[in-house]
Image: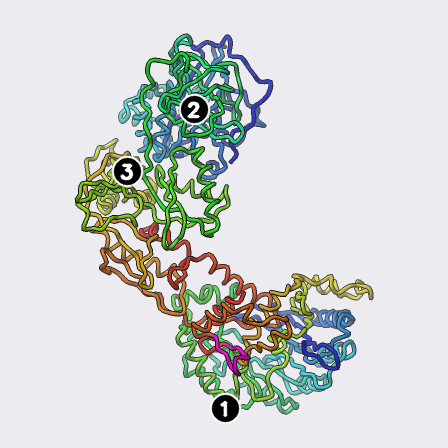
Amino acid sequence: MEKTDGKKQLGIYLHIPFCKRKCLYCDFLSAPAGEETIEAYVEALCRQIGKEAKGFVDHKVRTVFVGGGTPSLLTPGQMERLLSAVRSGYDFDDGAEVTAECNPGTLDGEKLAGYRRAGINRLSIGLQSAHDGELESLGRIHDYRTFLRNYDQARKAGFSNINIDLMSALPGQSLESWMDTLEKTAALGPEHISAYSLIIEEGTPFSDRYGHNGRESGTGKWPPLPDEELDRKMYEETERFLRKKGYFRYEISNYARPGYECRHNIGYWRRTDYLGMGIGAASFADPVRWKVDSDLAEYLSFFSDESCEDEKNPGGIRREVQSLDERERMEEFVILGLRMTEGISLPLFLQQFGIPFLEVFGPAVKKLETEGLLAFSQEGSRLHLTARGIDVSNYALAEFL
Amino acid sequence: MAGIGGILPGQEEADKGMDQNHIRNFCIIAHIDHGKSTLADRIIEMTGLLTSREMQEQVLDNMELERERGITIKSQAVRTIYRARSGEEYIFNLIDTPGHVDFNYEVSRALAACDGAVLVVDAAQGIEAQTLANVYLALDHDLEVFPVINKIDLPSAEPERVKEEIEDVIGLDASDAPLISAKNGTNVEEVLEQIVSKIPAPGGSADNPLQALIFDSLYDSYRGVIVFFRVMEGKVQKGTRIRLMATGASFEVVEVGYFGAGQLIPCEELSAGMVGYLTASIKNVKDTRVGDTITDADRPCSAPLPGYKKVNPMVYCGVYPADGAKYPDLRDALEKLQLNDASLFYEPETSVALGFGFRCGFLGLLHLEIIQERLEREYNLDLVTTAPGVVYRVHKTDGEMIELTNPSNLPDPSTIDYMEEPIVSAEIMVTTEFIGSIMELCQERRGRYLGMEYMEETRALLKYELPLNEIIYDFFDALKSRSRGYASFDYEIKGYEQSDLVRLDILINREEVDALSFIVHKDSAYERGRKMCEKLKDEIPRHLFEIPIQAAVGGKIIARETVKAMRKDVLAKCYGGDITRKKKLLEKQKEGKKRMRQIGNVEIPQKAFMSVLKLDDRK
């Protein structure tokens, strides 16, 4: 475990399950809601932040991530209350990375300045595409011009660490169109770029259109999804192009200028502890994982004014509590660590688990190495997925379970 | 298995005073779905002996599986008391018969235990192929048959037309046939009266040497084999030393009794004309073959009853445990099933692709499916079954003849003189508008047209000879779909005929997979090979490398498909640290792999081995 001042590092995740309108591909826990509901939720969330604190007194908060949904539906005042609750309840590192996800169309200069004052120092803006036709086909609420205006406002408000979220393999998208989005994005000079390829998730309107995993693409009236060849081509070209522009891939779908890797997300892959609050949020305090109940009404009543007595245990709203055994912890070390391009450190594995890595996973490593999906580096002390291994990472990672 | 319930103590109801003239042994025969089981229920209900509380939906169908499939697998019997309008009481022994052509032999044995049969005909559908087949079978056994017209409550019922049909086609007098609704109970009493008046009392004498016919048996882990039989002559009681004439085995009777509904009720003795059961510490169902004659070892009858016939399995397939470690469990399960089902055959075999398993023989495809389901359900086994095939006769140039049940064992073609395959005589009843499409189907299945008879203006009976291997897979489904469900079908094995047969082999990634080979007529080899490759292409998941799937006859490739290499298999966004969800996804992937068979470096899902069953895509 990485520690500072003898304290364990902690990431805090705050889930804002609201949005203006549900996007057609989205299967996250999020839905449109009125101002009153949002206010009640922020209230409850502040209470949860307070209640959970006593369980994390030996932790130091290194990162905060306000995710959604669309957290930028919150007023600067609401954002300020959430972050104050964190700062007052927890040992808070001065240099902490504090990210808020925002969506164009819910931002203006004043709001952004307010967020900055509240203590947000990193923005993750969901652009997805620089082409209005593609944005429309995704069911996004914004157009490219709105994004440009908001991006400019963010810089003016003093944000010097910005991520732009993009999505490739969109319906009807060509390689040229994708490269154009990339080019326009890189030209703006954000510190970080996320580029995911669209996944058709079950239960979304896209899955009705394209079938599960996009199997029925090209059969109906909707523009077809790019085939796998094109999808991989886009992925390869992304890496090549962004490297030229000074962005380096450090995780399967994440690129950053040196020093601007998202510390919060890296925490997930390195298995540092994190505390997720708000409905459906996942937490990890090694070796225990859990989730908060995902029912909004249940959550609001649990953390409501009256019922929220001091002795009330925030554990009562935890679901799917699971204590990992040694084997599961080792498996996670591998499957999470391998998402990072730097891969996993074998000496670190030995240090953490007291057993040589290859003694546990030798056969799987040998098989995947033979198949060209896994490679050693730094004199055999590190192991990482090859480019081909990244393409078929599910297949490769499943070998370790 | 639900099985037969416990013995009811204190119900030893003596049959004294109930002479042979007041016994009626009968069965109900019908085409499937014409309402046989429902009528049986009503008869049992209306003859009392059962309270309505004991009345389950379909009392005769004992096994859980039978209830779900709505068909009767093993014949069973029930005894009830009927107080007739005349005021006299009669013993009714209602013997249930399986309704499917696979179990024809068992039907025939059950009929032999009866003196008469109630023929149920659906008032809307009229006579169907199985109606005819069953009637002929019943008449063969010299049974008195009288017709009953069921489902008169249906709006589409045409009882008068059906009456005419019965008279014209079968030649039975239908003038006073009861018009009933077994479902609602309408007129069922009239059926009971006609059972008394039309079905003769059993013959035979209690004073003659014992001669009894086994029509079924059941294995019970506490009492051993329970033998179901009909006494033709003489009597049997506890302590009688019996001999089974075909097997020669002798036993001392521990208990005799008759059939309550779902229960065995012991009694003192069973004499000529009666139907019941006995137990005698018999360990093996094979000793008590259906159709065998029971006699008194100390005072044997002069000759057995006609007709013990060994039934031979007609359809074979390989049955393997999905998990190789479960092989002993599969063996135990087959052993247990065979105790109850002497027509099930199995012997150990080994497949390169599937490991250790068994070659199993069945009466037909339905029998196969039932056994497979029972293995999976009652014994909790996960199975891989290979394509079913029939028994081929391979005549070698050196004069030797091999009965081939496993395609892998086909000798080198250069040593084969010729091969033969089993042929059936089939009767298909169909409304005239579908004659064309049904004839086309039979043609495609290498049928030989024998003739056609018009039953009436709108219906005809088509007669064909067909190779058995053309009808065991999906013929019935194809028949139904090409006649909008109206055609009905019955067949019997006719014999063997020489045929131009080849073995179709499947190569996956250039390796022959023995479990996928099957025998096919030379003319359909190309078509079937092509479809098989297409099917497998869909079933086999993509691997890191390209996988050719080829069909070959005698080493010559006749069809090919390719499973393209996997390009992309990437985790979705790992959002908000929800690791558990992603791990579940990976675990699912891992689980899926466990259910696959490794052939060379290719992983093949188990259901791919059944692909050959689904080659007919005209659904």
Residue at 50% in and 59% down: B591
Chain to which mark 2 belongs = B
Q: Is residue B178 visible?
A: no
Q: In which quarter of the view is residue A100 placed?
A: bottom right
Q: Measure the alpha-carbon separation of dots 3 and 2.
A: 32 Å
Q: Amino acid at mark 1?
A: Lys
Please say if B458 is above or below A95: above
The disc, 3 or 2, on the residue closer to the chain's N-terminal end is: 2
Rendering coords of residue B601 (x, y %) = 39, 64
> Which residue carries the number 3 mark?
B431
Please say if A175 is above or below A353: below
Rendering coords of residue B314 (x, y %) = 31, 38
> Which residue carries the number 2 mark?
B95
- Dot 3: what SS? strand
> Which residue carries the number 1 mark?
A245
Chain to which mark 3 belongs = B
Q: Which residues are magenta?
A: A374-384
Q: Is residue A321 magenta?
A: no
